[in-house]
Image: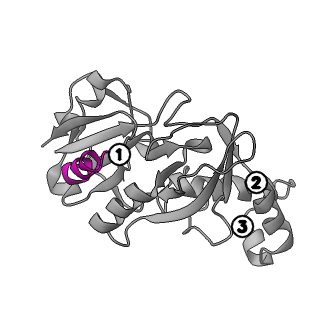
Amino acid sequence: MVWGMTLPSSFGEFWPEGEFAGWYDSLKAYYREQMPEEQKALFDDGNGNGTGNYMYYAGEKFIREVGTSVRPDDLPFSPIEPQEPPKSYTTVKSYASLGSLIKLADRILAVDDALKAIIERLEPGVHQFFPIDLLMRRGEVFPKAYHVLFIGQYRDSFSPENSKEGSWRKNGDYGYLFEESKKDVTALAFSKSIFGGSHLWRERGLWEWLTCFSDELEAEIVAAGLRIPKHYRMKEV
């Protein structure tokens, strides 16, 4: 079977409220001081927006498929470069506990060591992980290690014709929209012949709003006693 997880919608153990400490300043400094001129020209629109364009582009890489673009004329997203991952995330309050999979700012996901190990064992070399410090309000580092998660595979297995009518709608040229309730997520259908043996992936038509898990990955998460955001069993055809 296939499982679907939507992004957490309220602050708490699966979405600690906060911001990336110093990340945008470091991207800005790289653009201004170290980026080769030929690469810098790709972001310079002649109106002084080059720095902002690069900062947006680098941030979106963590939730987009390599080689795609948001709009047809946009620069396609390249692989994440060494200077681009955020190094720390500062929360507005202290948390006693956090889930094994959490959402940070800008719809970026992070996982703890235990979940990282499961994902890497099931799909070695497919996904990327970048260590990040979680800094609580008083400056202390959260005791459990986390890694920003880049999901490295996308599929086209969403099957509108086999999904319940009303659970989704067309979003112009930008794939599909769906309601994030349990009733509607469980009504979405996916083609086994297309997602095949994938364990963790996203659907091109549904973007970052839905993260898909295989039965095997979900079972490993349960067996390890890990806590992740709400996720629901969806239809497999």
Neighbours of disc 3 within 10 Å: few (<14), some (14-19), many (20+): few
The residue under the point 20% across, 61% down is 197
**Which residues lie in the magenta part?**
214-225
Mark 3 vs mark 1: in front: 1
Residue identifier under label 2: 24
Q: Is the magenta stretch mostly helix, strand or loop?
A: helix
Q: Which of 62 and 173 is in front in this view?
A: 62
Residue 181 locus on image (x, y percent): 35, 23
Residue identifier under label 3: 42
Residue 163 locus on image (x, y percent): 21, 32
Residue identifier under label 1: 226
Q: Is residue 164 left or right of residue 91?
A: left
SS under mark 1: loop
Q: Is residue 215 left or right of residue 182?
A: left
**Residue 117 forms part of the magenta stretch:** no
Mark 1 vs mark 2: in front: 1
Give the distance between the C-alpha atoms of the residues marked 1 and 2, in whole angstroms.
31 Å
